[in-house]
Image (tube, grey):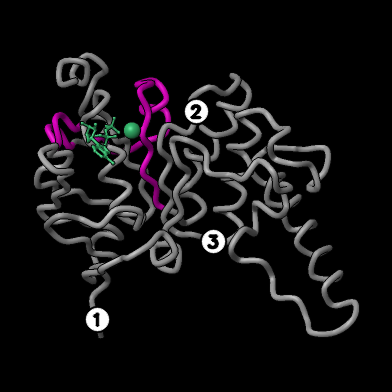
Amino acid sequence: MTESPDYVVETRNLVKSYGAVHAVKGVNFKLGKDEVVGLLGDNGAGKTTLIRMISGAERPTGGDILLRGEPVSMKSPRDAMHAGIETIHQYNSTVGTMSVAENIFLGREMLTGQIGNFGFLKKAEMRTLAEQSLGNVGFHLRSPDTRVGELSGGQRQGVAIARALQFQSKIMILDEPTNHISVKETNNVLDFTKNLPGRGYSGIFISHNLGHVFECCSRIVVMSRGRIVADESAEALTISDIEALL
Ligand SMILES: Nc1ncnc2c1ncn2[C@@H]1O[C@H](COP(=O)(O)OP(=O)(O)O)[C@@H](O)[C@H]1O
Ligand SMILES: [Mg+2]
């Protein structure tokens, strides 16, 4: 029998350079099952680059990524998606010209049948599922047919989250998900993030808001200039400890 791995995500000596810019310089990052890790650091610290490698959007220059204990070589976000990793990007990646339901199923549309009304049935099912998953995360939109371009930033974030939930991704990465959204929408996102472990998910939560991080995360990792400079349980850290590291 194989042992269950200690971490759902682990990076070993992970490196990413863009020419002379060394964005990530040998990072050993770990994400346990059913935990939410807060990833902090000043602008340019390398947070986004690190999670883009974990989500298949960037190829590492060096080092290894292990998923559930197995080394992986992901060539695209699609590979990461297949491995159960979903990313809510810093700059929302929903498509403005498509409807809410189309966005939620983008790239993974339910297969339509070959004949007659099957196509319609699947479309109706997608609309219903889209509405349900939005409701699950506390976002209620007028209609799943609304074009995403007509939504507020927070509603778009809701669509991105609903999309992730719809596919039962077990690892959720949120890169500054509360930027430019209202207080109420922020609370939805925070509630969602806080409850990830209860739903059997693990999460990486990037935010500049230390209050939000303490609210949602059980462990805190701080990066500075491409390296991890602190990795502690949230209980062991105070806001001023972290401010001193940023
Ligand atoms: N595609 C890129 N090309 C060149 N440099 C990049 C690229 N992406 C990020 N960088 C650089 O890598 C460093 C880390 O950036 P980033 O990971 O976005 O930091 P953070 O998310 O912590 O603000 C910065 O110096 C940034 O300018
Ligand atoms: Mg960033």
The mark closer to the camera, 2 or 1, is 2
Q: Which residue is labeled 1 in the image?
A: 2
Choose the circle earlier in sequence order: 3 or 2: 3
Q: Which stretch appears magenta?
A: 202-231
Quadrant of residue 159 within the rendered picture: top right
- Residue visible at 31% across and 46% down in the picture: 51
Front residue of 176 and 95: 95
Give the label, 3 or 1, closer to the camera: 3
* Quadrant (top left/top right/bottom left/bottom right) for the C terminus: top left
Which residue in the protein does label 2 denote? 178
Left-right relation of 47 to 25: right
- Label 1, secondary structure: give it: loop
Q: Earlier in the sequence, mark 3 or mark 1?
A: 1
Confirm if mark 2 falls within 8 A of ligand 2. no
Residue at 23% x, 71% y is 70
For label 1, count other residues whose C-alpha is less than 10 Å away and answer few (under 14), some (14-19) or many (20+): few
Amino acid type shown at disc 1: Thr
Residue farthest front in this picture: 19
Amino acid bearing label 2: Thr
**Is label 3 or label 2 in front?**
2
Q: Which residue is under mark 3? A: 168
User: Is 219 on the left-hand or right-hand side of 115?
Assistant: left
Q: Position of residue 47 (x, y in %)?
A: 27, 37
Indicate which disc residue 81 carries.
none
